[in-house]
Amino acid sequence: MAFRPLHDRVLVRRIEAEEKTAGGIIIPDSAKEKPSEGEVVAVGSGAKAEDGTVTPLDVKAGDRVLFGKWSGTEVKLDGEDLLIMKESDILGIIG
């Protein structure tokens, strides 16, 4: 992919949620919520401070992350739906 986010931004691919509940009930597409879990595809160089120093990001490409329900901006790159968000919108890394 020929896209690299700038500064403290992160490119994330959503990971689809389960099709069934634990009890075996199949969830139709219209009742599903957008997943709030994803995989980091690309990261920017880091956050710039006022004095010009760059602080590297805590996440890296390949990390599985949780993010807020309304986080990021949806974009379509190479026919794939992705999200661009600030690192601060990411709630945590799934280990």
Image (tube, rainbow, N blue to C red):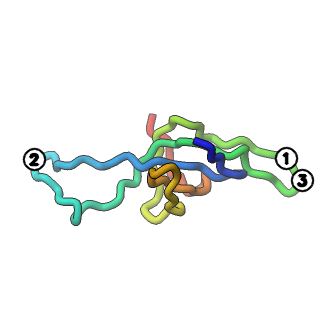
Q: Quadrant of the C terminus?
A: top left
Q: Are marks 1 and 3 in contact (CB under 8 Å)?
A: yes
Q: Quadrant of the N terminus?
A: top right
Disc number placed over residue 92 in the picture, else none:
none
Q: Is residue 15 left or right of residue 12?
A: left
Taking 43 as reference, is 28 above or below it? below
Taking 53 as reference, is 69 above or below it? below
Q: Which residue is mark 1?
A: 53
Amino acid type at image mark 3: Asp
Residue 92: x, y in percent?
50, 46
Could you tell me how far apart the alpha carbons at marks 1 and 2 are, in whole angstroms? 52 Å
Q: Residue furthest left?
A: 24
Give me the residue at 68% from left, 46% from top.
44
Residue 15: x, y in percent?
38, 46
Residue 56: x, y in percent?
72, 41
Q: Residue furthest right?
A: 51
Q: Which residue is mark 3?
A: 51
Amino acid type at image mark 1: Thr
Could you tell me how far apart the alpha carbons at marks 1 and 3 are, in whole angstroms? 6 Å
Tell which circle, 2 or 3, labels the residue nearer the N-terminal end: 2
Disc 3 crowd, CA 10 A, few/some/many (<14, 14-19, 20+): few
Amino acid type at image mark 2: Gly
Local secondary structure at mark 1: loop
Q: Which residue is mark 2?
A: 24
- Which of 33/74 is in front? 74
Disc 1 crowd, CA 10 A, few/some/many (<14, 14-19, 20+): few
Q: How many marks?
A: 3
Tell which circle, 1 or 2, labels the residue nearer the N-terminal end: 2
